[in-house]
Image: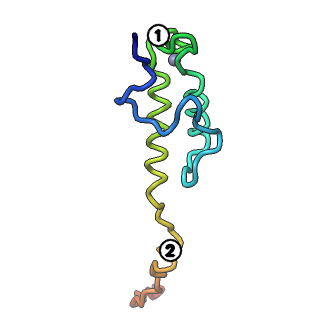
Amino acid sequence: MQLTRTEQPRIRSAYTRQNPPPDEPPKGVDELTGWQLAAAQWRRHLPDDLLGVDCVVCQIAWPCDAWEIANDIINSSRDNADRAPIEPTWEETLEERPRPRIRRAAQTEPA
Ligand SMILES: [Zn+2]
């Protein structure tokens, strides 16, 4: 009896073949295009249905490089999204307005 290779603990992914990354990035992910490309690549480079050991596109042992790259992008996108982005709006309001400096006007007398 052989164990299925579907569970590989070293792979870190929030998604599975049954629940692949969607085209619509999760909330907080700003890199829309990057996410969509990675998600599409992720869904393409999956192990084949028959044996589930080789990537259907690359025909090499899964996970292939292409899938791992896509998975890394997706993971880091999600990691970054978890951190609340700093809204620059209030920083801008606190920012000091350039005050007109009182300068001693150099007396440039016309000669
Ligand atoms: Zn592949």
Residue at horizontal 42 percent and vertical 19 percent from the top: 5
| Dot 1 crowding, Cα within 10 Å, few <14, some 14–19, many 20+ | few
In the rendered view, does 87 fall on the left or right side of 36? left
Q: The residue under label 1 is which amino acid type?
A: Ile
Looking at the rendering, which quadrant does residue 19 occupy? top right
Total numbered badges shown on the rendered structure: 2
Viewer-side residue, 51 vs 41: 51
**Residue 41, above or below 93:** above
Q: Position of residue 63 (x, y in %)?
A: 44, 20
Q: Position of residue 109 (x, y in %)?
A: 45, 88
Residue at horizontal 39 percent and vertical 90 percent from the top: 104
Q: Position of residue 69 (x, y in %)?
A: 46, 28
Viewer-side residue, 93 vs 32: 32
Residue hosting label 2:
92
| Dot 2 crowding, Cα within 10 Å, few <14, some 14–19, many 20+ | few
Residue at horizontal 45 percent and vertical 81 percent from the top: 96
Residue hosting label 1:
60
Nearest to viewer (mark 1 / mark 2):
1
